[in-house]
Amino acid sequence: MPEIPLRKGYSIQESDTVRTSVIENLSAKNFISLSKDEIVTCKKCGWHFVVDAEFIRRGSKVCPICQKTITKPKNTTYQSRVTSVNYKQIIKSLDKNLRAIFGDSNLILDKTGRYWILNEKERQSLLSIYGVSATTSFFSIANDEGIVFYLDSESIKPILNNFNKARFVYVDSPLITDSKGLRDLLNSLDHSNTLKYFALKTAFESYVQKVGPEYFEKTWAPLFIESIKTKHENLRQLYARLQTVKDTIINTKFVNIGGPGQPDFFLINTFEYLQAGLKPEKYGEMKCYTKSEFTMEDFGKALGHAVSNDTLSIVSSNDIHPMVWSKIFEFKNQEKYYKHVIIDKDLILFLIHNLELRDLIQ
Ligand SMILES: [Zn+2]
Protein backbone atom coordinates (compact mmCIF):
# COMPACT_ATOMS: atom_id res chain seq x y z
CA MET A 1 0.00 0.00 0.00
CA PRO A 2 1.40 3.42 -0.87
CA GLU A 3 1.78 5.85 2.04
CA ILE A 4 -0.36 8.89 1.40
CA PRO A 5 0.95 12.04 3.10
CA LEU A 6 -1.64 13.31 5.55
CA ARG A 7 -0.93 16.87 4.56
CA LYS A 8 -3.40 19.68 3.87
CA GLY A 9 -3.43 20.49 0.15
CA TYR A 10 -2.06 17.11 -1.01
CA SER A 11 -3.95 15.92 -4.09
CA ILE A 12 -4.26 12.78 -6.22
CA GLN A 13 -5.55 12.60 -9.79
CA GLU A 14 -8.44 10.19 -10.32
CA SER A 15 -6.40 8.37 -12.98
CA ASP A 16 -4.20 7.14 -10.12
CA THR A 17 -6.76 4.60 -8.99
CA VAL A 18 -4.58 2.85 -6.39
CA ARG A 19 -3.76 6.05 -4.49
CA THR A 20 -7.30 7.35 -4.91
CA SER A 21 -8.65 4.26 -3.18
CA VAL A 22 -6.08 4.59 -0.37
CA ILE A 23 -6.91 8.26 0.20
CA GLU A 24 -10.64 7.50 0.20
CA ASN A 25 -10.04 4.83 2.79
CA LEU A 26 -8.19 7.38 4.99
CA SER A 27 -11.14 9.72 4.55
CA ALA A 28 -13.58 6.92 5.51
CA LYS A 29 -11.55 6.47 8.72
CA ASN A 30 -12.03 10.22 9.24
CA PHE A 31 -8.23 10.80 9.37
CA ILE A 32 -8.64 13.49 6.70
CA SER A 33 -11.35 15.47 4.95
CA LEU A 34 -11.36 15.41 1.18
CA SER A 35 -12.80 17.54 -1.56
CA LYS A 36 -13.21 16.58 -5.19
CA ASP A 37 -11.92 19.23 -7.57
CA GLU A 38 -12.72 19.35 -11.26
CA ILE A 39 -9.42 19.76 -13.08
CA VAL A 40 -8.02 20.55 -16.51
CA THR A 41 -4.59 19.45 -17.64
CA CYS A 42 -2.32 21.69 -19.72
CA LYS A 43 -1.72 19.81 -22.97
CA LYS A 44 1.71 21.36 -23.44
CA CYS A 45 3.36 20.84 -20.02
CA GLY A 46 1.01 18.59 -18.04
CA TRP A 47 0.23 21.10 -15.25
CA HIS A 48 -3.13 20.51 -13.51
CA PHE A 49 -5.60 23.35 -12.94
CA VAL A 50 -8.55 23.39 -10.63
CA VAL A 51 -11.62 24.64 -12.47
CA ASP A 52 -12.50 27.61 -10.28
CA ALA A 53 -15.10 30.35 -10.64
CA GLU A 54 -12.66 32.64 -12.44
CA PHE A 55 -11.80 29.99 -15.03
CA ILE A 56 -15.51 29.38 -15.69
CA ARG A 57 -16.25 33.12 -16.00
CA ARG A 58 -13.38 33.85 -18.37
CA GLY A 59 -13.58 30.57 -20.25
CA SER A 60 -9.79 30.33 -20.36
CA LYS A 61 -6.65 30.55 -18.26
CA VAL A 62 -2.94 31.07 -18.92
CA CYS A 63 -0.72 28.20 -17.73
CA PRO A 64 1.69 29.59 -15.09
CA ILE A 65 4.31 27.05 -16.13
CA CYS A 66 4.44 27.27 -19.94
CA GLN A 67 2.20 30.33 -20.65
CA LYS A 68 -0.08 28.38 -22.99
CA THR A 69 -3.67 29.63 -23.02
CA ILE A 70 -6.00 26.84 -21.98
CA THR A 71 -9.71 26.68 -22.62
CA LYS A 72 -12.05 24.44 -20.69
CA PRO A 73 -12.52 21.16 -22.60
CA LYS A 74 -15.81 19.24 -22.59
CA ASN A 75 -14.38 16.30 -20.69
CA THR A 76 -12.62 17.21 -17.50
CA THR A 77 -11.26 14.91 -14.81
CA TYR A 78 -11.24 15.07 -11.04
CA GLN A 79 -8.72 15.04 -8.24
CA SER A 80 -9.10 14.25 -4.54
CA ARG A 81 -7.57 16.94 -2.34
CA VAL A 82 -6.90 16.87 1.42
CA THR A 83 -8.74 19.85 2.91
CA SER A 84 -7.93 19.10 6.55
CA VAL A 85 -6.12 16.59 8.71
CA ASN A 86 -8.20 15.35 11.62
CA TYR A 87 -5.55 15.07 14.34
CA LYS A 88 -8.09 14.32 17.04
CA GLN A 89 -9.37 11.27 15.17
CA ILE A 90 -5.81 10.07 14.37
CA ILE A 91 -4.85 10.26 18.07
CA LYS A 92 -8.10 8.49 19.04
CA SER A 93 -7.51 5.70 16.55
CA LEU A 94 -3.85 5.22 17.52
CA ASP A 95 -4.85 5.22 21.17
CA LYS A 96 -7.41 2.47 20.55
CA ASN A 97 -4.89 0.32 18.67
CA LEU A 98 -2.13 0.83 21.22
CA ARG A 99 -4.49 -0.03 24.08
CA ALA A 100 -5.49 -3.24 22.31
CA ILE A 101 -1.81 -4.21 22.15
CA PHE A 102 -0.39 -2.98 25.46
CA GLY A 103 -3.46 -2.91 27.70
CA ASP A 104 -5.23 0.02 29.34
CA SER A 105 -3.33 -0.08 32.60
CA ASN A 106 0.12 0.15 30.99
CA LEU A 107 -0.54 3.05 28.68
CA ILE A 108 -0.97 6.71 29.59
CA LEU A 109 -2.06 9.20 26.95
CA ASP A 110 -0.83 12.69 27.77
CA LYS A 111 -3.66 14.71 26.23
CA THR A 112 -1.87 18.05 26.36
CA GLY A 113 1.43 16.74 25.04
CA ARG A 114 -0.31 14.36 22.59
CA TYR A 115 2.00 11.40 23.28
CA TRP A 116 1.86 8.06 25.11
CA ILE A 117 3.91 6.77 28.00
CA LEU A 118 4.15 3.00 28.09
CA ASN A 119 4.92 1.44 31.48
CA GLU A 120 5.69 -2.22 31.40
CA LYS A 121 7.70 -4.32 33.80
CA GLU A 122 10.82 -4.37 31.71
CA ARG A 123 10.63 -0.89 30.28
CA GLN A 124 9.26 2.62 30.24
CA SER A 125 9.05 4.18 26.81
CA LEU A 126 7.49 7.02 24.92
CA LEU A 127 5.43 6.86 21.72
CA SER A 128 4.92 10.14 19.95
CA ILE A 129 3.59 11.58 16.71
CA TYR A 130 6.05 13.62 14.68
CA GLY A 131 4.88 17.20 14.30
CA VAL A 132 1.97 16.69 16.69
CA SER A 133 3.42 15.64 20.05
CA ALA A 134 4.80 18.46 22.19
CA THR A 135 7.96 16.97 23.63
CA THR A 136 10.93 19.23 22.88
CA SER A 137 12.57 18.12 26.12
CA PHE A 138 12.13 14.44 25.24
CA PHE A 139 13.65 14.79 21.78
CA SER A 140 16.56 16.70 23.29
CA ILE A 141 17.29 14.16 26.04
CA ALA A 142 16.44 10.91 24.24
CA ASN A 143 16.63 11.99 20.63
CA ASP A 144 17.16 8.57 19.06
CA GLU A 145 14.74 6.50 21.08
CA GLY A 146 11.12 5.40 21.21
CA ILE A 147 8.60 4.90 18.44
CA VAL A 148 7.65 7.97 16.45
CA PHE A 149 4.53 7.84 14.30
CA TYR A 150 4.49 10.14 11.29
CA LEU A 151 1.82 11.55 9.00
CA ASP A 152 3.95 12.61 6.08
CA SER A 153 7.17 10.85 5.06
CA GLU A 154 8.49 14.10 3.51
CA SER A 155 8.49 15.82 6.89
CA ILE A 156 10.75 13.24 8.57
CA LYS A 157 13.26 12.87 5.71
CA PRO A 158 15.77 15.41 7.08
CA ILE A 159 16.16 13.51 10.35
CA LEU A 160 16.22 9.93 9.06
CA ASN A 161 19.41 7.91 9.05
CA ASN A 162 20.34 4.23 8.92
CA PHE A 163 20.41 3.96 12.70
CA ASN A 164 17.06 5.52 13.53
CA LYS A 165 14.81 4.82 10.54
CA ALA A 166 13.27 1.63 12.02
CA ARG A 167 11.57 3.54 14.82
CA PHE A 168 9.53 5.76 12.48
CA VAL A 169 6.11 4.25 11.76
CA TYR A 170 3.47 5.62 9.37
CA VAL A 171 0.18 6.34 11.21
CA ASP A 172 -1.78 4.03 8.93
CA SER A 173 0.86 1.27 8.84
CA PRO A 174 -0.33 -2.32 9.35
CA LEU A 175 2.29 -2.49 12.14
CA ILE A 176 -0.01 -0.40 14.35
CA THR A 177 -2.43 -3.29 14.76
CA ASP A 178 0.28 -5.98 14.70
CA SER A 179 0.88 -6.83 18.33
CA LYS A 180 3.99 -8.95 17.77
CA GLY A 181 5.51 -6.61 15.19
CA LEU A 182 5.13 -3.52 17.36
CA ARG A 183 6.48 -5.32 20.43
CA ASP A 184 9.45 -6.66 18.46
CA LEU A 185 10.19 -3.13 17.30
CA LEU A 186 10.01 -1.78 20.87
CA ASN A 187 12.30 -4.58 22.05
CA SER A 188 14.86 -3.73 19.39
CA LEU A 189 15.18 -0.09 20.50
CA ASP A 190 17.44 1.32 23.18
CA HIS A 191 15.49 3.07 25.95
CA SER A 192 18.26 4.15 28.32
CA ASN A 193 17.97 7.88 27.64
CA THR A 194 14.19 7.65 27.83
CA LEU A 195 14.62 6.63 31.46
CA LYS A 196 16.74 9.74 32.08
CA TYR A 197 13.96 11.85 30.59
CA PHE A 198 11.25 10.26 32.74
CA ALA A 199 13.40 10.57 35.86
CA LEU A 200 13.83 14.30 35.22
CA LYS A 201 10.13 14.81 34.48
CA THR A 202 9.07 12.94 37.63
CA ALA A 203 11.64 14.79 39.77
CA PHE A 204 10.35 18.15 38.54
CA GLU A 205 6.68 17.26 39.03
CA SER A 206 7.23 15.99 42.58
CA TYR A 207 9.36 19.03 43.39
CA VAL A 208 6.59 21.44 42.31
CA GLN A 209 4.07 19.49 44.39
CA LYS A 210 6.34 19.39 47.41
CA VAL A 211 7.20 23.11 47.54
CA GLY A 212 3.73 24.37 46.62
CA PRO A 213 2.63 27.17 44.26
CA GLU A 214 3.70 30.13 46.36
CA TYR A 215 7.29 28.97 46.84
CA PHE A 216 7.50 27.91 43.22
CA GLU A 217 6.30 31.27 41.91
CA LYS A 218 8.03 33.63 44.34
CA THR A 219 11.28 31.81 45.09
CA TRP A 220 11.97 29.00 42.66
CA ALA A 221 11.22 30.73 39.35
CA PRO A 222 13.43 33.79 40.07
CA LEU A 223 16.18 31.41 41.19
CA PHE A 224 15.76 29.41 37.98
CA ILE A 225 16.18 32.56 35.88
CA GLU A 226 19.16 33.73 38.00
CA SER A 227 20.78 30.33 37.52
CA ILE A 228 20.33 30.48 33.74
CA LYS A 229 22.19 33.82 33.79
CA THR A 230 25.19 32.20 35.48
CA LYS A 231 25.38 29.41 32.90
CA HIS A 232 26.89 31.44 30.05
CA GLU A 233 29.07 28.65 28.75
CA ASN A 234 26.32 25.99 28.82
CA LEU A 235 23.90 28.39 27.16
CA ARG A 236 26.43 29.23 24.47
CA GLN A 237 26.98 25.51 23.81
CA LEU A 238 23.24 24.85 23.75
CA TYR A 239 22.64 27.63 21.22
CA ALA A 240 25.53 26.38 19.08
CA ARG A 241 24.13 22.85 19.15
CA LEU A 242 20.61 24.00 18.29
CA GLN A 243 21.97 25.92 15.31
CA THR A 244 23.62 22.81 13.93
CA VAL A 245 20.30 20.92 14.10
CA LYS A 246 18.13 23.90 13.19
CA ASP A 247 15.79 22.10 10.80
CA THR A 248 15.25 19.04 12.94
CA ILE A 249 12.88 17.89 15.63
CA ILE A 250 15.47 18.68 18.31
CA ASN A 251 15.23 22.40 17.52
CA THR A 252 11.45 22.38 17.08
CA LYS A 253 8.68 23.00 19.54
CA PHE A 254 5.26 21.95 18.24
CA VAL A 255 2.39 23.96 19.66
CA ASN A 256 -1.35 23.74 19.12
CA ILE A 257 -2.92 26.95 17.83
CA GLY A 258 -6.25 25.48 16.72
CA GLY A 259 -9.66 25.83 18.31
CA PRO A 260 -11.37 23.08 20.30
CA GLY A 261 -11.46 19.79 18.42
CA GLN A 262 -9.65 21.34 15.48
CA PRO A 263 -5.97 21.41 16.31
CA ASP A 264 -3.61 23.11 13.98
CA PHE A 265 0.07 23.08 14.71
CA PHE A 266 2.72 25.70 14.62
CA LEU A 267 6.42 24.95 14.64
CA ILE A 268 8.57 27.11 16.87
CA ASN A 269 12.28 27.34 16.13
CA THR A 270 13.47 26.62 19.68
CA PHE A 271 16.77 28.43 19.17
CA GLU A 272 15.09 31.64 18.03
CA TYR A 273 12.40 31.41 20.71
CA LEU A 274 14.82 30.84 23.60
CA GLN A 275 17.17 33.55 22.41
CA ALA A 276 14.31 36.05 22.53
CA GLY A 277 12.96 34.68 25.82
CA LEU A 278 16.23 34.62 27.73
CA LYS A 279 17.34 38.14 26.85
CA PRO A 280 18.15 40.11 30.04
CA GLU A 281 15.48 42.75 29.17
CA LYS A 282 12.80 40.10 29.65
CA TYR A 283 13.90 39.13 33.16
CA GLY A 284 12.42 42.30 34.66
CA GLU A 285 8.98 41.34 33.40
CA MET A 286 9.12 37.71 34.47
CA LYS A 287 5.90 36.23 35.87
CA CYS A 288 5.37 32.74 37.11
CA TYR A 289 2.35 30.42 37.17
CA THR A 290 1.69 27.02 38.69
CA LYS A 291 -1.86 26.62 37.41
CA SER A 292 -2.66 23.42 35.55
CA GLU A 293 -3.82 25.47 32.56
CA PHE A 294 -2.49 28.81 31.29
CA THR A 295 -5.52 30.67 29.94
CA MET A 296 -6.09 33.77 27.81
CA GLU A 297 -7.01 35.57 31.03
CA ASP A 298 -3.62 34.70 32.57
CA PHE A 299 -1.87 35.85 29.42
CA GLY A 300 -3.91 39.08 29.40
CA LYS A 301 -2.80 39.77 32.98
CA ALA A 302 0.84 39.11 32.11
CA LEU A 303 0.59 41.61 29.25
CA GLY A 304 -1.32 44.10 31.42
CA HIS A 305 1.44 44.14 34.03
CA ALA A 306 4.06 44.72 31.39
CA VAL A 307 2.24 47.54 29.52
CA SER A 308 4.16 47.70 26.25
CA ASN A 309 7.21 45.78 27.41
CA ASP A 310 8.34 42.30 26.55
CA THR A 311 7.15 39.54 28.88
CA LEU A 312 8.49 36.24 30.09
CA SER A 313 6.13 33.76 31.76
CA ILE A 314 7.34 30.65 33.54
CA VAL A 315 4.55 28.07 33.64
CA SER A 316 4.84 24.75 35.47
CA SER A 317 2.33 23.08 33.11
CA ASN A 318 2.31 22.33 29.37
CA ASP A 319 -1.35 23.20 29.02
CA ILE A 320 -1.16 26.57 27.29
CA HIS A 321 -4.41 27.64 25.66
CA PRO A 322 -4.17 27.57 21.82
CA MET A 323 -5.39 31.18 21.67
CA VAL A 324 -2.41 32.22 23.78
CA TRP A 325 -0.02 30.67 21.27
CA SER A 326 -1.91 32.37 18.41
CA LYS A 327 -1.46 35.72 20.17
CA ILE A 328 2.24 35.04 20.70
CA PHE A 329 2.66 34.48 16.94
CA GLU A 330 0.62 37.57 16.16
CA PHE A 331 3.03 39.66 18.24
CA LYS A 332 5.96 37.84 16.64
CA ASN A 333 4.71 38.76 13.16
CA GLN A 334 4.27 42.41 14.11
CA GLU A 335 7.52 42.83 16.01
CA LYS A 336 9.68 40.37 14.04
CA TYR A 337 10.84 38.72 17.27
CA TYR A 338 9.20 36.85 20.16
CA LYS A 339 8.05 39.80 22.27
CA HIS A 340 6.18 37.50 24.64
CA VAL A 341 7.68 34.19 25.64
CA ILE A 342 6.26 31.38 27.73
CA ILE A 343 8.66 28.85 29.20
CA ASP A 344 6.34 25.91 29.85
CA LYS A 345 7.11 22.68 31.66
CA ASP A 346 8.56 21.14 28.50
CA LEU A 347 11.04 24.00 28.08
CA ILE A 348 11.82 24.12 31.82
CA LEU A 349 12.89 20.45 31.58
CA PHE A 350 14.78 21.21 28.38
CA LEU A 351 16.73 24.00 30.12
CA ILE A 352 17.31 22.09 33.36
CA HIS A 353 18.78 19.21 31.36
CA ASN A 354 20.87 21.18 28.89
CA LEU A 355 22.15 23.81 31.33
CA GLU A 356 22.90 21.27 34.08
CA LEU A 357 20.47 22.80 36.58
CA ARG A 358 19.40 19.52 38.19
CA ASP A 359 20.39 20.86 41.65
CA LEU A 360 17.44 23.27 41.50
CA ILE A 361 14.91 20.48 41.86
CA GLN A 362 16.65 18.39 44.52
ZN1 LIG B 1 1.47 24.40 -19.34
Image (spheres, rainbow, N blue to C red):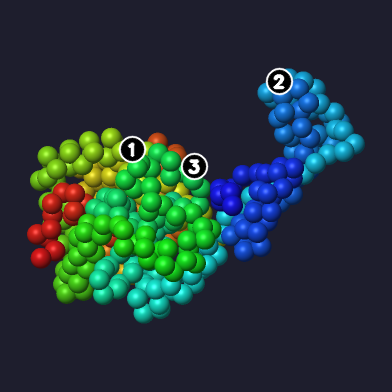
Pick the front one: 121 or 298: 121
Pick the front one: 172 or 86: 172
Residue type beneath disc 2: Cys
Residue 55: give x, y in percent of width and height: 81, 34
User: For numbered disc 1, what is the local secondary structure?
Assistant: loop
Mark 2: few, some, or many residues within 10 Å (few <14, many ≥20)? Answer: few
Residue 39: give x, y in percent of width and height: 77, 39
Q: Is residue 58 left or right of residue 140?
A: right
**Residue found 57% across the figure and 55% down from its top:** 85
Q: Is mark 3 within 8 Å of ligand 1?
A: no
Q: Earlier in the sequence, mark 1 or mark 3?
A: 3
Q: Which residue is mark 2?
A: 66
Q: Earlier in the sequence, mark 1 or mark 2?
A: 2
Residue type beneath disc 3: Glu
User: For numbered disc 3, what is the local secondary structure?
Assistant: helix
**Residue found 22% across the figure and 36% down from its top:** 240
**Residue found 19% across the figure and 65% down from its top:** 199
Q: Which residue is mark 3?
A: 154
Residue type beneath disc 1: Lys
User: For numbered disc 2, what is the local secondary structure?
Assistant: loop
Is 78 placed above or below 300 here? above
Is 310 placed above or below 292 here? above
Q: Which residue is mark 1?
A: 246
Residues at marks 1 and 3, CA–CA distance in whole angstroms: 17 Å
Mark 3: few, some, or many residues within 10 Å (few <14, many ≥20)? Answer: few
Mark 1: few, some, or many residues within 10 Å (few <14, many ≥20)? Answer: some
Pick the front one: 122 or 322: 122
